[in-house]
Image (cartoon, grey):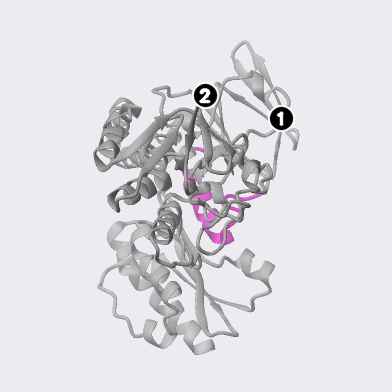
């Protein structure tokens, strides 16, 4: 029984069916998940349309075509052909080996939790009484608000701020922490902040939202620094939390708490009294990205089919698909400080590459991070055009623990942004 039909659930269920297992998948929304309908696919489509200079109407038409107009019949039919039984409805575990789906009880042997995550709505006075979007609404409706306030300067907030600013909305971003992309290296947020300001985005950094009121001409937002903003729509991009409540997991002895994912071991098995519970994707609270969900799903699938595979999360990429792109992988400077790692940092400005001159775009930088005690590359960050493509070799180097002596001997094609990693790699090798 696979509970949740998103990226991870679809992959696990289909893989097990192909291997001859009897599989049912429970989903109360759209089979295929957030990524396909309300997140990665529509957001990247709109960002591409913005770069191409398309009209908003063209961009929306392209987005909706790519998401199948948010209809899942084709996906469900394909899974049925593979042998998966799709149960539409809300599933709740009622005890070991038993699950109720909208009043009908079903039995199971193994249970795989793939219920994903849900947006967090901050407890701000008046926010619940005004028109607001989460990413679901912002990436599925045809509306183009004249004035949009984005709450949150993380990856989702930054991507959608750029989308709506590119198509003509007057966009403001409110981020209490004082900078964008607080989990990553400071330079990454600075490069992106400069790009957004050049597009006309009003960044209110270091201020929080105090309360919201309706006015005759829209909405009025009061900020903690005394400032105000007027808007027609508010987009809440203040993070997501694993969807664990109301699943009945306590009947299996699975300990959960609001805001936290279900605990998993290195094989993605969930400690429980029944011993037959697994989890993959955002519900685990680990590396919350679509590609991480796919990775965990492959681990669950392999382990259910008799192999033994353990997860290694050292090199899961984190990407913000703005222009310029922000890419990070491995340990960030903030994480290194928290873990007490003696970090060596070396960087390089993309403006020094020939590719930057060819592209007529000198924005961006790359930084590489090495653990002095181990003499290995353990993290990296980049902000620049196409960084999601040319930084993949660094993810491989971190995962494979490739010696710096090998990395410094790699030859990159000319002229590419990939050349920008050569100088910092040599610097790190020399300092170590």
Q: Position of residue 268 (x, y in %)?
A: 51, 58
381 and 291: which is toward the camera: 291
**Residue 124: image x %, image y %?**
71, 30
- Mark closer to the chain start, 2 or 1: 2
Name the residue located 39 percent from the left edge and 39 percent from the top edge. 24
Q: Secondary structure at mark 1?
A: loop
For the point 75% across and 33% down, which residue is it? 226
Residue at 41% in and 49% down: 321
Side of 133 relative to 321 (left or right) = right
Residue position marked by numbered label 1 in the rendering: 124
42 or 7: which is nearer to us? 7
Q: Is residue 69 left or right of residue 210?
A: left
Question: According to the image, label 2 marks what residue?
Answer: 103
Tell me if residue 416 can be seen. Answer: yes
Residue 279: x and y in percent read 51, 51
The residue stretch that appears in magenta? 178-204
């Amino acid at each position: 029984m696979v509970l949740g039909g998103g990226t991870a659930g679809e992959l696990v269920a289909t893989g097990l069916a192909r291997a001859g297992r009897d599989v049912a998948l429970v989903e109360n929304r759209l089979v295929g998940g957030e990524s396909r309908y309300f997140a990665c696919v529509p957001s990247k489509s709109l960002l591409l349309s913005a770069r191409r200079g398309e009209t908003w109407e063209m961009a929306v038409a392209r987005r909706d075509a790519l998401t199948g107009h948010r209809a899942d019949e084709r996906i469900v039919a394909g899974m049925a052909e593979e042998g998966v039984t799709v149960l539409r409805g809300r599933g709740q575990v009622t005890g070991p080996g038993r699950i109720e789906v909208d009043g009908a009880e079903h039995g199971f042997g193994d249970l795989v939790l793939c219920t994903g995550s849900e947006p967090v709505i901050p407890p701000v006075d008046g926010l619940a009484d005004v028109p607001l979007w989460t990413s679901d609404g912002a990436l599925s409706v045809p509306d183009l608000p004249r004035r949009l306030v984005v709450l949150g300067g993380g990856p989702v907030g930054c991507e959608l701020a750029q989308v709506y600013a590119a198509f003509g909305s007057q966009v403001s971003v409110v981020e209490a922490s004082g900078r964008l992309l607080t989990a990553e290296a400071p330079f990454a947020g600075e490069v992106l902040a400069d790009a957004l300001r050049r597009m006309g985005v009003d960044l209110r950094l270091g201020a929080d939202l105090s309360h919201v009121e309706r006015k005759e001409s829209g909405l009025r937002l009061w900020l903690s620094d005394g400032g105000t903003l007027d808007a027609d729509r508010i987009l809440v991009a203040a993070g997501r939390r694993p969807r664990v409540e109301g699943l009945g997991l306590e009947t299996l002895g699975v300990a959960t708490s609001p805001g936290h994912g279900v605990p998993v071991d290195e094989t993605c098995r969930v400690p429980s009294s029944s011993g037959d519970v697994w989890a993959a994707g955002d519900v685990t609270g680990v590396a919350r990205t679509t590609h991480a969900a796919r990775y965990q799903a492959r681990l669950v699938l392999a382990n259910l089919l008799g192999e033994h595979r353990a997860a290694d999360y050292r090199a899961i990429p984190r990407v913000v698909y703005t222009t310029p792109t922000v890419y990070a992988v491995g340990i960030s400077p903030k994480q290194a400080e928290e873990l007490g790692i003696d970090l060596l940092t070396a960087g390089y400005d993309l403006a020094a590459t020939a590719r930057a001159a060819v592209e007529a775009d000198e924005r961006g930088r790359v930084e590489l991070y090495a653990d002095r005690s181990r003499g290995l590359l353990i993290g990296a960050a980049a902000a620049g055009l196409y960084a999601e493509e040319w930084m993949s070799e660094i993810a491989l180097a971190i995962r494979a623990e490739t010696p710096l002596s090998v990395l410094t001997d790699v030859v990159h094609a000319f002229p590419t942004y990939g050349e920008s990693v050569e100088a910092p790699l040599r610097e790190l090798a020399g300092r170590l």
